[in-house]
Image (tube, rainbow, N blue to C red):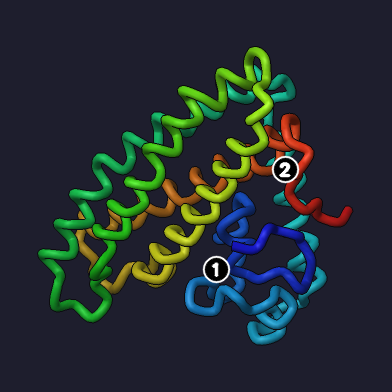
Amino acid sequence: MTELNLNLDAPVGTIACELPGAAELLRQHGIGFCCDGDVSLGDAAADAGVVASDLLDRLRALEQAARRDAPDGTNELIAHILERYHQTHRNDLEWLIPLAQKVEHVHATHSSAPLGLAKALVDLQDQLIPHMAREELALFPMMRHEPDPDIEHLIGRMRDDHACEGQSLATIEHLTHGFALPSGACRSWTALYVGLQKFSEDLVTHMHLENKVLFPRFSSVEDVASPS
C-alpha cells in the first residue's frame, strides 16, 4: 500500500484506510474507495462533483485532529493503544466473525449478501492477533525501556503488517458495499454492519497513531509527511 501523503494525487483507497474518519467523509460525498481505490483524490472529487480543494481541507483537518488526540508521552501513548485498541479489536472479532457467518448463511441468496465476509474477517484476525502480540511482547517493551538496535527492523515489519491490514479493510468495504444495508435488513445484518464500521474506524485510528505518531519517535525511516 502506498504511504499516505495527503494531497490531490493521493489514492482514495490509501486515504480511507490510513486516515481516521476519512472513509466516512468519502462515503458522505459519494466517493467509493474499494474497487476504485487507486483513483486520485482529485479525480474522484471531480467525478463526484465535489470541490476537491474543500475536500482536501476537510481531510487535513481530520489528520490534525488525530494527532491532537494522541497522548504526548510515549508510555502514555502505548498504554492508550493497548487499552483502547488491542483488546477491543480482539473482543470485536470474537463476535463479528460468527455473526458474519450467520448473516451469510441465512441470506445467502440475497443479491446484497456479503458472501466471503466471514473468511475476510478470519484472514484479518490471523494477521492482526500475531501482529498485536509482537507489539506487546517485543516492540512496546523495547520502546518503554532501552531501544534495541534492531528496533527499526521491527518497526518496518509492523508498517508492512499495517499495509496488509489496510488491504483487508478495503476488501471488507467492498464485500459490504460500504456497509450499505439493503432495505428491510434484519437485526443481525444491521448489528453486523454497525459493528464492522466501528471496528474498521478503530483499526484505522490505531494504525494511524502508530505509523504517524509513535513509530517516528524511534525510527529514522519515517512515514512520508503530509504537507502543511
- Distance from label 2 to label 1 (Cα)? 19 Å
Place of residue 215 in the rendered image (x, y in percent of width and height, measured from the top left): 68, 36
Residue in view at x 72 percent, y 69 percent? 10
Tell me the quadrant of the picture where the N terminus can be found. bottom right
> Is residue 222 rendered to the left or right of residue 82?
right
x then y, percent, for residue 26: 60, 67
Q: Considering depth in this image, is 90 or 177 the residue closer to the camera?
A: 90
**Residues tagged 2 and 1 counted as in contact (Cβ below 8 A):** no
Residue at which label 2 appears: 65
Determine the image quadrant of residue 155.
top right
Q: Residue at x 24, y 49 (%)?
A: 97
User: For residue 128, which quarter of the picture?
Assistant: top left
The amino acid type, in three-letter code, at marker 2 is: Ala
Residue 114 falls left or right of residue 141? left
Label 1's element?
A: helix
- Amino acid type at circle 1 is Arg
Q: Residue furthest right?
A: 228
Residue, x 60% and y 20% (percent of image)? 142
Mark 1 Cα-neighbour bin, 10 Å: few <14, some 14–19, many ≥20? some
Circle 2 crowding by C-alpha within 10 Å: few under 14, some 14–19, many from 20:
few
Measured as percent of width and height from the top left, residue 66 is found at 69, 42
Residue 152 occupies quadrant:
top right
Q: Which residue is mark 1?
A: 27
Residue 114, above or below 80? below
In front here: 122 or 92? 122
Whether 153 is drawn above or below 50: the answer is above
Q: Residue at x 18, y 49 (%)?
A: 98
**Residue 169 percent coordinates (x, y):** 45, 58
